[in-house]
Image (cartoon, rainbow, N blue to C red):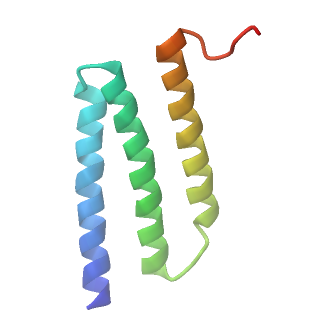
């Protein structure tokens, strides 16, 4: 029964990843695309977590950590670029 729930969760996560990819490619504004990228990163971390549960291992925990850090930094950098037009200030 537990494996059925885990596989159902994987299917739901894959469907949500496809929806986020559509939002990234078709998004009417740049802000929508950034939100789609952020949601894609968070969902990928969840996908890796479900895979770790399915395989009963913690081997991918480093990958999930690095992906979450990169997703956060990318979202902050893109948001700052949209707001000010530059990522690094000369201050």
Residue sitting at 56 percent across and 49 percent down? 67
Q: Is residue 36 left or right of residue 4?
A: right
Residue 22 position in % (x across, y down):
23, 36
Q: Is residue 28 left or right of residue 68?
A: left
Residue sitting at 25 percent across and 83 percent down? 4
Picture layout, residue 29 above or below residue 57: above
Q: Is residue 73 left or right of residue 16?
A: right
Residue sitting at 74 percent across and 8 percent down? 90
Q: In terms of image quadrants, where is residue 62? A: bottom right
Label count reads 0
Quadrant of the image containing the C terminus = top right
56 or 45, nearer to the observer: 45
Residue 73 position in % (x across, y down):
59, 36
Residue 12 position in % (x across, y down):
24, 62
Q: In terms of image quadrants, where is residue 54? A: bottom left
Outermost residue to the bottom: 1
Quadrant of the image containing the N terminus = bottom left
Residue sitting at 38 percent across and 44 percent down? 39
Picture layout, residue 48 above or below residue 2: above
Q: In terms of image quadrants, where is residue 74? A: top right
Residue 59 position in % (x across, y down):
61, 71
């Amino acid at each position: 029964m537990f494996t059925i729930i885990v596989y159902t969760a994987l299917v739901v996560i894959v469907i949500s990843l496809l929806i986020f990819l559509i939002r990234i490619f078709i998004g009417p504004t740049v802000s929508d695309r950034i939100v789609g990228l952020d949601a894609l990163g968070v969902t990928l971390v969840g996908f890796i977590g479900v895979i770790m549960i399915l395989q009963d291992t913690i081997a991918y925990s480093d990958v999930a950590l690095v992906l979450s850090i990169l997703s956060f930094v990318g979202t902050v950098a893109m948001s700052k670029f949209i707001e000010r037009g530059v990522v690094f200030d000369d201050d």
